[in-house]
């Protein structure tokens, strides 16, 4: 697919996504400016990232370190400044690499990972790394996320660290759950964290299939892949 054709496709998809976000905000009595679109570009080429940046996208999400590091380097080489969100499950041995290019890590769910990221951020950054604590809404360890008392322990650990800044929470609606139920629960937990840590106001929730429910329940960031970039096997 030519760059011009791909740019037109992305522009049309982006317009549709932005219209969905605006309608959801209006329905929730919120300003459309209160919700940030994070374009999840995993498996898509760096050329798509650069095209999205040219269309006004400022926040990009990736879930694998090697892929994300390469794209971030290509964007820097092109003179494009983006806010990079690491949204996948993160191994501690990748903490130093991720801390070197990410602006936000959305998937911190354990004390050990928080400690590893803190050490890495202090070693490779000149400012704190923003962190969202990933919340497990169903307690399934296979899906990642902190649940129960671990949620408060991890949040407190991030907030008290020198190399990290507690930005808020992130979650994915569990399979089999009605999205409204999931995001209502997340909103409750997010409110409890803000009561203790007033600066932790970010709520990253909602994807292509459920962004409206996420916004209705207070999401400040929505992570959009398929609706924006299309199905991977449709690309030529």
Image (cartoon, grey):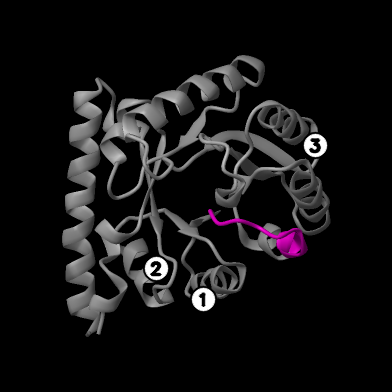
Q: Earlier in the sequence, mark 3 or mark 1?
A: 1
Q: Secondary structure at mark 2?
A: helix
Q: Position of residue 191 (x, y in %)?
A: 52, 19
Q: Position of residue 139 (x, y in %)?
A: 58, 37
Location of residue 206 with respect to 120 vertically, above or below: above
Q: Which residues are drawn in magenta?
A: 87-96
From the viewer's side, name the closer residue of 76 and 63. 63
Give the label on residue 74, or none.
Answer: 1
From the viewer's side, name the closer residue of 28 and 4. 28
Distance, label 2 to label 3, CA atoms, is 32 Å
Location of residue 33 with respect to 227 vertically, above or below: above
Give the residue at x 20% y 42%: 20
Q: Indicate yes or no whether the magenta region holds residue 94.
A: yes
Q: Secondary structure at mark 3?
A: loop
Distance, label 1 to label 2, CA atoms, is 10 Å
Distance, label 3 to label 1, CA atoms, is 31 Å
Give the label on residue 161, or none.
Answer: 3
Give the residue at x 69% y 57%: 99
Per the image, the residue denoted by label 2 is 49
Q: Quadrant of residue 148?
A: top right
- Visible residue check, residue 59: yes
Give the residue at x 28% y 24%: 30
Q: On the picture, is 5 further left or further right than 50?
A: left
Q: On the picture, is 174 further left or further right than 56?
A: right
Task: Evaluate if marks 3 and 1 touch, with contact meaning CB atoms under 8 Å apart.
Answer: no
Question: How crowded is the residue under tag 3: few (<14 C-alpha within 10 Å), some, or many (20+)?
Answer: some
Give the label on residue 117, or none.
Answer: none
Q: Quadrant of residue 13?
A: bottom left
User: Where's the N terminus, which quadrant?
Assistant: bottom left
Give the residue at x 47% y 28%: 186
């Amino acid at each position: 697919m030519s760059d011009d054709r791909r740019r037109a496709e992305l522009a049309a998809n982006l317009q549709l996504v932005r219209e969905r976000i605006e309608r959801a905000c209006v329905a929730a009595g919120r300003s459309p400016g209160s919700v940030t679109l994070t374009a999840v570009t995993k498996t898509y080429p760096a050329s798509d990232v650069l095209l999205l940046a040219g269309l006004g996208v400022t926040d990009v999400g990736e879930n694998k370190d090697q892929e994300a590091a390469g794209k971030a380097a290509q964007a820097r080489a092109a003179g494009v400044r983006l806010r990079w969100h690491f949204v996948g499950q993160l191994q501690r041995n990748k903490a130093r690499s991720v801390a070197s290019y990410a602006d936000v890590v959305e998937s911190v769910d354990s004390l050990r990972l928080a400690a590893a990221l803190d050490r890495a951020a202090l070693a490779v950054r000149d400012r704190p790394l923003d962190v969202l604590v990933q919340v497990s809404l169903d307690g399934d360890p296979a899906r990642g996320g902190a649940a129960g008392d671990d949620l408060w322990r991890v949040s407190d650990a991030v907030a008290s660290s020198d190399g990290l800044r507690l930005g808020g929470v992130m979650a994915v609606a569990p399979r089999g759950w009605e999205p409204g139920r999931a995001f209502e629960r997340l909103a409750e937990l997010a409110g409890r964290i803000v009561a203790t840590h007033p600066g932790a106001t970010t709520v990253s929730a909602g994807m292509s299939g459920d962004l409206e429910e996420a916004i209705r329940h207070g999401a400040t960031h929505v992570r959009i892949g398929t609706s924006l970039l299309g199905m991977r096997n449709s690309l030529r």
